Amino acid sequence: MRSFIRRYPRMVIGASIILAVICLAIAAPILFPFSPWEMRGAPFEPPGSPGFILGSDALGRDIAAGLAHGTWVSLLIGGVSTLASLGIGISLGALAGYVGGRVDDAVMRFAEFFQTIPSFLLAILLVAIFRPSIFSIITAIALVSWPPVARVVRAEFLSLRKREFVQAAEVLGVSHFRIVWQTLLPNALPPVIVLGSLMVANAVLTESALSFLGLGDANWMSWGFLVGSGRSVIRIGWWISVLPGVAIVITVLGLNLLGEGLQTWLNPRLSKRDLP
Amino acid sequence: MSSNRLQAMPRLIGWRVLKMAAMVLAIVVVNFLLIHAAPGDPASAIAGQSGQADAEFMRQLREQFGLDKPLPLQLWIYIERVLTLDLGVSHRLQRPILTVIFERLPATLLLTGTAFLIALASGVALGVRAARKPGGIADTLIMGGSLFFYATPLFLVGIVLVLVFGVWLNWLPTFGMETVDMPLQGIARATDIARHAVLPVITLAVFYSAVYVRLTRASMVEVSSYPFIKTARAKGASETRIRWVHMLRNALLPVITLAGIQAGHLVGGSILVETVFAWPGIGSLAFEALLARDYDLLLGIFLCTSVVVLTFNLLTDLVYLAFDPRVQAL
Amino acid sequence: MTCKLLAVEQLSIGLPAYADRAQAVSKVSFSLGEGEILCVVGESGSGKSMIANSIMGLLSKELPVLGGRIELQGIDLLNQTPAQLRILRGSRMGMVFQEPMAALNPLMRIGDQIAEVFQVHGIACSQERVADLLRAVNLPDPEVLVRVYPHMLSGGQRQRVVIAMAIALEPSLLIADEPTTALDVTTQAQILKLIRDIQRRRNTGVLFITHDFGVVREIADRVIVMKDGELVEHGSADDVLERPLHDYTKKLLAAVPRPNMDAPRPRADRAILQASGLRKTYWRGSKEVAALNDISLDLRKGETIGLVGESGSGKSTLARTIVNLVTPDSGEIRFEGTDLRSLSRKQWKPFRKRIQFLFQDPFESLDPRRTVGDIISDGPIAHGTSAAEARAIAREKLQLVGLDPSAVVRWPHEFSGGQRQRIGIARALAMNAELLIADEPVSALDVSVQAQILDLLEGLRDKLGLSMLFITHDMRVAAQICDRIAVMKLGEIVEEAPARELLSNPQHPYTRMLIASVPGLAAGSVVGSAMETS
């Protein structure tokens, strides 16, 4: 265990951060057994005031409570939208890489389209037109973030198909399904796992940006909303914006560290060169 | 052989332009689908919440879109309208959408262009420095910094900069693009705009700089293990020459590719930055349209920024073509 | 003896902590005279390349020089500052590498890369000088070539460019690290000749690293033999090749493939595989390349036909066409009378049991994420055998190829190259195949391992009555194992004959050139001497 920590410090730090954030989400209803929208006292109480560890906002709401409850939205949206886009990306990428030819062309053009257009603007449009809700936010983020997955899976499949051990399975008479399922997918997975953790980070950032612009789900407290709501009163209470922002940074940092750690762990070829 | 490449250029560029046109068409179709997929009547979706627009306006809209006609025909009408550069009228501003967008475009181009150049230059320079001695002090500091800024939302960077340099230190303006109450001319005006631009540009550049640092470093480390680097050493070339002549050029190839892909993201970033700094560009226009539920305007912005991004993509493709003699077809 | 140019004394090079032995090179001493060619021979991991790199000062930091001296014309190379060493590189000593395809900067014109040698040493360089160098390495059209980028040149041409750079400043020492290993045999012969010419013309001392005794015979004045970082034999080329003293040298020489001298086996009447009129073209950019051009082949039951050709000859395409990994444009492939081309994927399936394929790269052909048992069981399971039964088959086949049956639970990466190739054979034979298509099955292996695998294949063929189509680039290997040899060039079979006949009396000019290019043959038969010593 100790040697694992020494070899993959980033992964251990990243995983610890994410674990802590998950614990915070679980503990939120216990630590703050009231709605984060509830006014709990005087407005603009600075951090450390009695009753407000992290201060209060312009309406006297508890920032600490908002922060803890907001964890849910970030994790939920980050996780579910990533799963959805992994689903889309892996199926389309596998299809393109395995079938090849025109199917490949078509899928790749489609992915290229989604990759070149201003994706954040498309996400804004989708959420705005379909009304802001957890569901529309997840759909929008998933729709704009699958192309890298599809590209990676396709590239892996294409190069794996040329590899001799895949041709060997073909020559043995192994079925398409088994070749894809037992040979191609497991070998294509490591880069997808790495990408997945980075995508959760991106989804958390995108969600916070959407809520910051006022496109969050009105039923859920979120970090981006807190940052946005504090923006106009920054001169009076800097902590309203900055502290939830710090929460976003720590979470995203943890996910990125986890992703980088996974990369060195799953791909030992890189580890000697890239690890300091 | 190189003349072959020159001859092939017009064909390659023509091919790219054609592809770009297809993409624009696809975006128009997406726009159309968005209008029709919206809950409720497209006209009410466009006009915002149905209650907000009066009956006459709604009737006008329905007629304008030919909502009684079959869907493919409606699509055709829509495409025709867009191709004749008619993006409709913003119901909020009561002005043609294209005019509004063109008014705001220069401010955004100034912001994103400057930020992009700064991000690219600083990112590549720092990435090269970090790759010089992987694991060294400089590498640790640079990579730590880039990891941090890579994880920080743009709007948070903006807010913190406003707080520190605007509110606490009061060194730089944090609102708008120029001082409104004091009309300036010539150099004085340019200086004024530059002072206003410092914080928004830094905000936008910092994130993308972090992206380029990471890519450049990884790319340099990768290239350093290529056999031709050893060939250069065997020739007696100095390490400095190897780094700048042999490694950097090769390491820049993926950076150019990413720069092309990132263009679309820059637009997203500018929405956030312009919102924070009230920079009068496309981004804050999008935010205003969002607040006013002016979806027609939003769709227009989506289309226009896409065209800008695609043009930028075309440029990066050409740069790549000039850079890498191996590319025969794009 | 000639004047001393390079002296290496008691050289030791360390290895990183995770390596399997303490030192990459331990206490190696030798010297090289002016105008002399010294070959360093050894198998992979013998430390031969590290000696070359330590002389140039190009060892990576993980491989520190632990002790010893290296002296070039009286200069103590190990005690030079990096700046001093940099000046010596290129001017006093030049180096040629193994991978010509990757040895040139892809973004820089050929002329600029050659001119760079002069520039970095502060010497003015004219266009003519570069052109002269290109002429000196026998490259055509120097005026055009200087403006060209590396990707437009073939491997052999690129290696000539690398040689031109190495000799640009007329260094007295040229180090060549397996310079012909990645090249085709006819190109290899030309490059070897070029290096010899340069050595004679300019009186350059050449340190030539190789694994191939044929190449040694072709070029060496003196030879040192390396094994596991130690120098085991040192002497003149004649002495080492004809009268080796060390057992390891003897073993290596005996492993060099040699023509089968047994009486030819009778040819069966029944054909097992018949191909006729096979065509396959690829589009490379806007150019059409014929990989197979009207190929016809007749393989009899129990027979082994060798398909010999250089890269791009279409031999691998032909092999893959037969097992339906590549679809031909036209033509017919009959297996015991059944036309395989007209079959659907489902109809093909029963033939998968009977026709099997052996791949080239033992590190590529086994799925790294599955156990050896699972890998070998794949075929039987795909054809309806129960998992338990398939596992039993796997154990049995492992024994057949000379591995312990307990290997079923282990992972591919736990095995050496030769062992992995044995696993590949076990997999191919798991369903009692009748026809084995072997695509360069020994070309990625060290010579001693290669000999073992060839013996194994030969034994299995006789024991199981296998018919074989054996694809190789190495005429020597084909001569050892094949009954008949077909020579391929640019998608066509230019000549086909019984092995012995083809070797002793080649008809087609290309066959003659191919045989003449086999290293070691021209300078007296490696083959013959190897037989004497074994």
Image: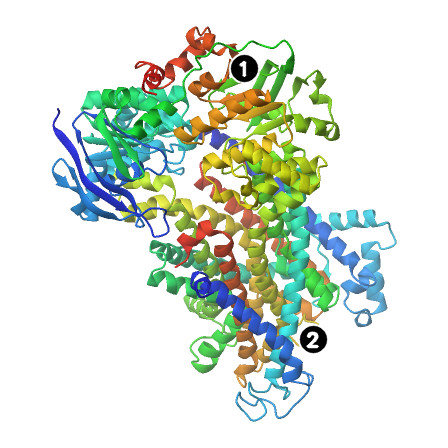
Residue pointed to by mark 1: C492
Residue C362 visible in the displayed image:
no
| Amino acid type of the residue that numbered disc 1 sits on in the rendered structure | Glu
Nearer to us in this view, C127 or C469: C469
Residue pointed to by mark 2: A220
| Amino acid type of the residue that numbered disc 2 sits on in the rendered structure | Trp
Residue at 48 percent across and 12 percent down: it is: C499
Q: Is residue A236 above or below residue A183?
A: below
Nearer to us in this view, C323 or A89: C323
Mark nearest the camera among 2 and 1 is: 1
10 Å neighbourhood of mark 1: few (<14), some, or many (≥20)? many
The local secondary structure at tag 1 comes to strand
Residue C35 visible in the displayed image:
yes
Q: How far apart are marks 2 and 1 (CA)?
A: 72 Å
Estimate the x, y position of residue C424 in percent, counting from the top left: 55, 34
Label 2 is found on which chain of the structure?
A
Estimate the x, y position of residue C478 in percent, counting from the top left: 47, 18
